[in-house]
């Protein structure tokens, strides 16, 4: 059991790239932002409430391990944002993406004065600038700084929300959670700014009190004029340094473009007669966008989906090796063929001929699809393959129409069982069928539905055998393979011949398990993962390790001699839970 776990960890490690690091660091910063905004919102109660809140806020975020994690995330996220500005060669994406980059790059410049005045002032001179001192600065001493700080709040919040949107929009739960997320995205910053306003009003009132001024505006809290001048100088140097860094990045971009043009051009042939001459260094997707060639890309070139996949025509040995992230995504969708690559990651250095695997008229890199759930979505599904045994011998002794009649009755009995259990018949392949479970349920319920469907299939086939007993020399038999895992679901096909289906390793494994029912002389082979998630006892079904074609490690499965008993196992589990 240790080997599959190790393989899973290795797969996860292969999937970690700069975008994943940026996502994690951004999530940490967004958590800080939420905490800070909620603290501001306490100003709607009183300044004292804000002071109590900031005590716990500071106690958590300045706890040494948390502080190291937070400040590390800030540095990493800023550095990756600057790197993204340099790396990106094409800005003709959805308008929201360059907006997110511009907002993110503006935040450090706008917030430097606040960081230096509060954090660095405390570290260098022991200043104790908290809400009373900051509200005094914003509403009395320097009102212009209030508008800068409010702009920072809005910019940081919008930048973070865009990042969350790009992260969550392909998740199965996003459509249901979107109204709640939108409400939180509007309410939290609104309450924060109202809290600052109410706190400012209270500070204006308190300012008339001489004792308040003596206590809250003392040198111990604000520092001397010389200290303030020094902090202002540090702020100026850091601001100029950051702007200079951005300027260097822009100069580096221009230099790279010049070198690429001098380095020569390559030809990209799209397999439909269209050929582009593009400079070396562009990814295939960037080249498509630059020259207005429609190219599918649901995630916007982030290597978080596989809809920009292309198949290389001809020799692919000279192409750059896939990055760990690209290899991870291709492996996740079962595309281990070296001729299949992600257009957003492949940067060819020689002429290339290819064709797109997904149709750009249904999935555009520049526009949202009308039905994003059918464009491409990663989610956990349970796949069931059901195959009719002996259909070849059945056809040898019957007229073609009689054979079609019996096969259709078989597929009808299987489909009825799948629908009754809560699944969805998906593909009919000759005398077999692929059914999907979990399109509208969680993974545990999807596993239980698949096991109930297997039992119902046996019952329906028994009835069918009885109905056709006068016409069959031997009863219809079947084999079932069941496995669950992360897959990509969406529309596949061409023009008017589009079908909704699932792609991924879990689907392939389910097909392999169905084939094993022949050699294991049983009606069903179920992966142990499905058994465990369904809540079936470990000793309820015999276990064995089998080799799966295309996998390096053996897999633990459960061979079910008769699927009729599966409904009792699932029912027993539900009775225990009740």
Image (cartoon, rainbow, N blue to C red):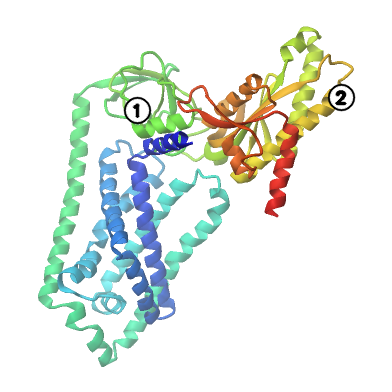
**Residue 203 appearing in the image:** yes
In the image, farthest residue toward the top: 396
Identify the mark at residue 322; answer none if there is no mark: 1
Q: Is residue 530 above or below residue 58?
A: above
Instruction: Choose the circle earlier in sequence order: 2 or 1.
Output: 1
Q: Is residue 94 left or right of residue 241?
A: right
Q: Please name which of the two marks, 2 or 1, marks the residue nearer to the observer.
A: 2
x, y percent for residue 326: 38, 32
Q: Is residue 174 above or below residue 316?
A: below
Residue located 66% across and 42% down the image:
448
Quadrant housing residue 566? top right
Quadrant housing residue 536? top right
Residue located 37% across and 43% down the image:
20
Q: Which residue is mark 2?
A: 466
**570 or 320, which is in the foreground?**
570
**Residue 385 appearing in the image:** no
Q: Is residue 493 left or right of residue 51?
A: right
Q: Is residue 195 above or below residue 486?
A: below
- Which quadrant holds the C terminus? bottom right
In the image, farthest residue toward the bottom: 210
x, y percent for residue 177: 55, 53
**54 or 219, which is in the foreground?**
54
């Amino acid at each position: 059991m240790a080997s599959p776990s190790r393989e899973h960890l290795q797969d996860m490690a292969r999937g970690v790239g700069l975008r994943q690091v940026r996502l994690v660091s951004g999530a940490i910063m967004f958590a800080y932002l939420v905490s800070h905004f909620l603290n501001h919102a306490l100003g709607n109660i009183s300044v004292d409430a804000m002071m109590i809140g900031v005590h716990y806020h500071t106690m958590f975020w300045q706890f040494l391990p948390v502080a190291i994690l937070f400040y590390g995330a800030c540095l990493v996220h800023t550095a990756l944002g600057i790197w993204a500005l340099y790396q990106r060669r094409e800005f003709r994406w959805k308008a929201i993406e360059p907006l997110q980059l511009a907002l993110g790059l503006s935040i450090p410049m706008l917030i430097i004065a606040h960081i230096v005045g509060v954090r660095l002032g405390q570290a260098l001179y022991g200043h104790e600038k908290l809400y009373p001192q900051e509200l005094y600065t914003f509403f009395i001493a320097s009102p212009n700084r209030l508008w800068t700080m409010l702009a920072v709040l809005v910019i940081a919040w919008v930048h973070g929300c865009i990042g969350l949107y790009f992260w969550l929009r392909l998740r199965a739960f996003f459509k249901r959670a979107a109204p709640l997320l939108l409400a939180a995205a509007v309410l939290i910053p609104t309450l924060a700014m109202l809290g600052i306003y109410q706190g400012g009003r209270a500070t204006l009132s308190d300012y008339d009190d001489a004792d308040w001024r003596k206590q809250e505006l003392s040198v111990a809290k604000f520092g001397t004029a010389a200290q303030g001048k020094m902090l202002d100088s540090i702020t100026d140097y850091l601001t100029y340094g950051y702007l200079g860094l951005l300027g260097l990045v822009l100069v580096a971009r221009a230099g790279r473009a010049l070198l690429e043009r001098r380095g020569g051009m390559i030809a990209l042939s799209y397999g439909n007669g269209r050929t582009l001459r593009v400079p070396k260094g562009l990814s295939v997707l960037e080249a498509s966008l630059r020259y207005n060639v429609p190219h599918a890309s649901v995630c916007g070139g982030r290597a978080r989906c596989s809809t920009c996949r292309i198949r290389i025509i001809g020799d692919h040995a000279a192409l750059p090796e896939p990055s760990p992230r690209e290899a991870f995504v291709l492996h996740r969708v079962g595309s281990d063929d070296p001729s299949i690559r992600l257009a957003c990651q492949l940067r060819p250095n020689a002429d290339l001929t290819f064709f797109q695997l997904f149709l750009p008229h249904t999935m555009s890199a520049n526009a949202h699809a009308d039905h994003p759930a059918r464009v491409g979505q990663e989610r956990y599904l349970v796949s069931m393959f059901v195959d009719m045994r002996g259909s070849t011998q059945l056809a040898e002794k019957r007229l073609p129409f009689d054979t079609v009649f019996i096969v259709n009755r078989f597929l009808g009995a299987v489909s009825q069982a799948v629908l009754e259990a809560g699944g969805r018949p998906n593909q009919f392949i000759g005398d077999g069928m692929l059914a999907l479970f979990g399109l509208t349920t969680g993974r545990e319920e999807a596993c239980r539905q698949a096991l109930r469907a297997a039992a119902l299939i046996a019952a329906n086939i028994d009835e069918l055998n009885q109905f056709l007993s006068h016409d069959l020399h031997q009863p219809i038999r079947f084999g079932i393979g069941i496995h669950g895992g992360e897959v990509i679901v969406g529309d596949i096909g061409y023009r008017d011949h589009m079908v909704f289906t699932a792609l991924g390793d879990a689907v392939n494994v389910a097909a392999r398990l169905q084939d094993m029912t022949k050699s294991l002389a049983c009606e069903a082979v179920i992966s142990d993962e499905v058994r465990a998630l369904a809540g079936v006892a470990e000793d309820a079904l015999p276990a064995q390790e089998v080799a799966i074609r295309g996998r390096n490690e053996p897999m633990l499965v459960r061979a079910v001699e008769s699927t009729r008993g599966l409904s009792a196992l699932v029912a027993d589990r539900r009775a225990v839970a009740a």
